[in-house]
Image (spheres, coloured by chain):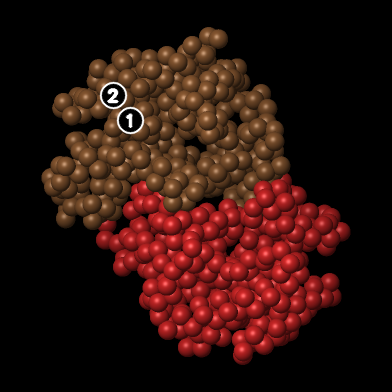
Chain colours: A brown, B red
Amino acid sequence: MSAEPVRVLVTGAAGQIAYSLLFGIAKGDVFGKDQPITLILLDITPMLPVLGGVVMELQDCALPLLREVIPTDKEEVAFKDLDAAILVGSMPRREGMERKDLLKANVAIFKSQGAALEKYAKKTVKVLVVGNPANTNCLIAAKSAPSIPKENFSCLTRLDHNRARSQVAMRCGVPATQVKNVIIWGNHSSTQYPDVHHCKVNMAGSDLACFDAVKDDDWLKGAFISTVQQRGAAVIAARKLSSAMSAAKAICDHMRDIWSGTPEGEFVSMGVYSSSNSYGVAEDLIYSFPVHIKDKQWKIVDGLAINEFSRGKMDATAAELVEERDTAVTFLSA
Amino acid sequence: MPDLADPIRVLVTGAAGQIAYSLLYSIAKGDVFGKDQPIILVLLDIPPMLPVLDGVVMELQDCALPLLREVIPTDKVEVGFKDLDAAILVGSMPRKEGMERKDLLKANVAIFKTQGAALEKYAKKTVRVLVVGNPANTNCLIASKSAPSIPKENFSCLTRLDHNRARSQVAMRCGVPADAVKNVIIWGNHSSTQYPDVHHAMVNVRGKEVEAYDAVKDDSWLKGDFISTVQLRGAAVIKARKLSSAMSAAKAICDHMRDWWFGTLDGEFMSMGVYAGGNSYGIPEDLIYSFPVHIKNKLWNIHDGLPINDFSRAKMDATAAELVEERDTALSFLSQ
């Protein structure tokens, strides 16, 4: 075993999603099975005792790659010299809370964390924002860390991407890995657009266009889309808790693909900075696009044909993001 | 897509619960049975938990895992135990406030008698059974006795969590990664009488294999606080988290099952609660007792011939005595 340990931060580290996530990271599933890790766990002060329990459990897992675990409630400790940051923690919506209040509270958090990244982290740090509203929180963090390239910031839409793959796969009776190149466009919210116009399904040895494999255009343009959009709520209704297991899996997929690249011919969905995009999506947003990744750099997959149906949905989710951004930015300057 | 094997059928009970939630993903991902082994995952829980179980099924689908051929949620033993290759029995009656130990044993005897009988009736005779639900050793014994035509060697209980905890404590003390510590032993009951023994453990210090007592250089710690820390670790985690150790328990379950499936490395042994019949360490027969084992071709063998000093002897006997008492109480319920 070779390398210098990578320093990886997880925020909201005492919470549900982190509990499902930390093991996958510490085991080597994300950064590679020969890559030692220094894992930094940040949460708010009242959660420090719980965090102590999580640290005990990580020790009890007896994992060879886990060089060190650092629990903390201090940003100057958490963000120091980071190679990767997974920002899971955010202010959750409470009963009676207006959307504006939620945005305001989260702008405060992600402005502070962006500034901490700017001040303490390596300039090469890769930042994945999970805490909702993920796209806007990510944008605020990026704007608060001006000397870190905007390309280093992304938000999670991989869970929606995996859900879309899985729905198509179950419909076609194939394993989910035989469904490639679904796209999630836009906001990680109920306006997201799961698009399978460019998706391929491997059935009986050959690659079929998704619409031909499924043979149910109504479903693909109707219930399929709403199922993926509302899957999070369906899981909460059943479990009484949100989707920690599948969210953690998606986080690992997203981060692993940033670290090791995407396979030839395949693209994945990531919320990334929309500037200079060729799809007519407004600039200065974090918007989910289809991307290839190589050498830890993502590139939007250009040149995909966009029909009217898709155009309408891509624009609707962009409009929501513009509104969120504009509200958030007013709080940023307040 | 490469040619993959026929799927194996794996049951997890208590499937809507906390430990299962940390465990199912690793199983479905291939970390236990191999990355080319497709799996049919059968999830059993009690009827009130079926809606929650549906949520778990949704999430497993949303993980988009290639090896997961099918997920079958159920509350029926005839569905749960059918044609199984492996069974991980996590579900058990938890201790409720005011509950006496006897009541806990009685409730669990009922559960594991039923599940043992279901294994006997529905599962393959080659099924490997790992009992996790506490009291694990005694629940395992009851299940085994209720499945007379399945070899007793196919039943085991989990002490790998204690084993991993012991490794980790020694590793942290020596400033080495946990996998640099080998051949710790957990003897006996998965309870506070367990005996974490490092007399035969080795620590890799800067490339050299050193006996644990020489690497640690603190005999009173190894014979005192080290032991109580490992014995009481479960309670320490509950106190901090307000929930029990799901993440580390799931990891230990995966380690135990994976080693059973693929074998242990040369020169290394692991801790498993197994049938004590024919053991050479003077432990009473007819118990499920944690021993150091080698595993090859899905068969475990107790590592014989380790010298046992007075200190160890007393602790091994104490935990055996507790198991004898538990067994006798449980058997009295079994015959009712």
Camera-side residue of A102 and B194: A102
Residue at the right extreme, as displayed: B220
Where residue B146 sits in the image (x, y, percent)? 53, 85
Badge 1: how crowded within 10 Å, few (<14), some, or many (20+)?
many
Q: Give the quarter of the image for residue B104.
A: bottom right
Q: Residue A123, relative to residue B57: is it above or below?
A: above
**Residue hosting label 2:** A316
> As drawn, is B122 to the left or to the right of B22?
left
Camera-side residue of B326 and B180: B326
**Residue drawn at 76 percent across, 70 percent down:** B193
Where residue B322 sits in the image (x, y, percent)? 75, 77
Q: CA distance from mark 1 to mark 2?
A: 7 Å
**Residue hosting label 1:** A191
**Residue drawn at 71 percent across, 79 percent down:** B326
Where residue A18 sits in the image (x, y, percent)? 55, 41
Q: Please, what is the three-letter code of the amino acid marked with disc 1?
A: Thr
Q: How many marks?
A: 2
Camera-side residue of B307 and B293: B293
Query: What subunit carries mark 2?
Result: A
**Residue drawn at 24 percent across, 20 percent down:** A279
Q: Residue A29, relative to residue B38: is it above or below?
A: above
Question: Closer to the N terminus: mark 1 or mark 2?
Answer: 1
Q: Please, what is the three-letter code of the amino acid marked with disc 2?
A: Ala
Residue at the top extreme, as displayed: A333
Query: Do marks 1 and 2 share a chain?
Result: yes
> As drawn, is B309 to the left or to the right of A15?
right
Query: What subunit carries mark 1?
Result: A
Residues at badges 1 and 2 in contact (C-beta under 8 Å)?
yes
